[in-house]
Amino acid sequence: MRLLAEFFPEFTESLDKMDELYRDKRTIDEKTYQFICFALSIKARSKPCVLKHFQGALEAGATVKELAYILALVMREAAGADDCWTHDVLGDWKEIIAGNIKCDCQK
Amino acid sequence: MRLLAEFFPEFTESLDKMDELYRDKRTIDEKTYQFICFALSIKARSKPCVLKHFQGALEAGATVKELAYILALVMREAAGADDCWTHDVLGDWKEIIAGNIKCDCQK
Amino acid sequence: MRLLAEFFPEFTESLDKMDELYRDKRTIDEKTYQFICFALSIKARSKPCVLKHFQGALEAGATVKELAYILALVMREAAGADDCWTHDVLGDWKEIIAGNIKCDCQK
Amino acid sequence: MRLLAEFFPEFTESLDKMDELYRDKRTIDEKTYQFICFALSIKARSKPCVLKHFQGALEAGATVKELAYILALVMREAAGADDCWTHDVLGDWKEIIAGNIKCDCQK
Amino acid sequence: MRLLAEFFPEFTESLDKMDELYRDKRTIDEKTYQFICFALSIKARSKPCVLKHFQGALEAGATVKELAYILALVMREAAGADDCWTHDVLGDWKEIIAGNIKCDCQK
Amino acid sequence: MRLLAEFFPEFTESLDKMDELYRDKRTIDEKTYQFICFALSIKARSKPCVLKHFQGALEAGATVKELAYILALVMREAAGADDCWTHDVLGDWKEIIAGNIKCDCQK
């Protein structure tokens, strides 16, 4: 038995109810749900979750090819997030170079 | 002009071609694409990306309600990834307690 | 012998002194210290650290039940951080929908 | 009103119930709870959460000094997690140097 | 054959071209390149990447000692990033304590 | 005055000594040091650190072009880490599809 289920069963039940609620209410289909979970599991570096949702997506009718495309999207967005976040931070790079922007960070 | 586009335009072009390729080949529709990007942008803590894909999803016909459901899924999976990853690591917790598992980490 | 200790022993000593200092000065008890380290080790996805502080907490008198509760808290806060961060970013969602907020991110 | 509360109130209620449950059952005191949340909020790079738990800790009777010590612990453990994780991965570095360990990663 | 190469070979080719471009244009030498990749692989918690760039650095003429120093830098900067980010967020801590700063986060 | 320096000056001094030690011993030049710190600051989503090391690199004689190339490398490696990590996890994808690999994760 899993640690949390054994020692804090009320919390596990609470999560189960949340999952039921989500399943009842969700507006996306099972395949899309599994794709999003698969993508998030990669970012979370959780091997058991990646395996679970890889299998879950296949069971929901996805092909391995479709999952390869989701992986490609995760990779592209990883680069994209560093791109946009850094450009947001360095937006005024001409001002930084000109010495007009003070960095608050301790030297 | 953005820093990367100004100083390494070949790299930016390379990313643009990758995006074109992805658009041509992808097997998911625009709304699903925006949902996955929205979810990944939250995990990447990139504000400009979150705004971009929130707007992109709406333009693709999504409702704010649907985006709220994606946020809920991101939150649920954040908890879920910690859950599964930690249970994977602590799978043998009875053995750990019994002192039969050595931790390699330096004391 | 560990890589760092063998090739950069002065750095390892520096860390050891920092740990001594922390032990001498800290205002929290050993069990609380181990709980915080256990929680941080999960977020850092470091298996040896999780095992170390799981054992460390038990040695400090914690029960497995208490550790299960810390895990539950880590999970809840993972969801909570995505919740608060995203709402902070999307605070003006009515303005975003109305098209009054420009996203700086490159299309 | 927050996005999630407006468009998915059942999910927000579900989180509220989970928080009530945690409050009822938890074995740590309020100050320790706030310390752990403060530490996790830093790792999650969530500014509103850091402010919330900084204030929450003070309201629970913590001093700013105690919070400075928690920050120091977060910093020390950030270094520590990279340390342990990397040594775990590079444990056999003498074997790697000797060329006896194959890297599966694509060249 | 790797999943992505088998099911989305155009994407893999696109990445290969990007790598060629980077190799042609880059202004840093191979050893520096490997050091940066080694550092990033630790942060990304990707074991195969760490092994790849540990070996790559050695092949580029780096010593194990130099790699130990890079690891030390990664560790120091992990602590440093938590330091600077948190101080940025808590910059007005005297104002926060005085109750003059409102936290937007839901209670 | 910064929070940590005011309330835990011994810890700040300890970090300062560590920095001195690193400066004395390091085998990389200042520009390479700043490049690695710039790359790590992006991954750590710490704006003040990115600004500090952007400026630090320029002061060490780097050009903005060189920094744009480091950003490109960070982006490429972000995609690369997701690539290698996921392929490591899904290495046996043919076995997974064949149903020969059990996922330990709770259904």
Image: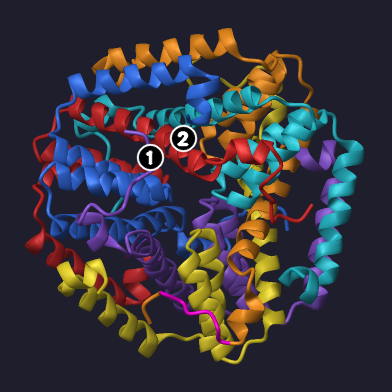
Chain colours: A red, B blue, C purple, D yellow, E orange, F cyan
Residue B91: % across, % down: 42, 57
State which region is magenta: E99-104
In whole angstroms, how far apart are the C-alphas of marks 2 and 1? 9 Å
Our reading of the magenta stretch's main secondary structure is loop
User: Toward which corner of the image does residue E105 lie, by quadrant?
Assistant: bottom left
Q: Chain of mark 2?
A: A
- The quarter of the picture where the N terminus of chain A appears is bottom left
B15 sits to left or right of E97: left
Front residue (pair A37, F28)? F28
User: Is F51 drawn above or below residue C17 in the view shown?
Assistant: above
Q: On the image, numbered disc 2 is attached to which residue?
A: A83
Foreground residue among A52 and B35: B35
Question: For mark 1, what is the residue?
Answer: C105
> Residue shown at 38%/40% (left/top)?
C105
Residue type highlighted by circle 1: Cys
Whether residue D79 sits left or right of residue B43 in the image: it is right
**Can residue A33 be seen at all in this image of the molecule?**
no
| Chain ID, mark 1 | C
Which amino acid does the dot numbered 2 rest on?
Asp
For mark 2, does the 10 Å Cα neighbourhood hold few (<14), some (14 to 19), or many (20 or more) residues? many
Furthest residue to the right? F24
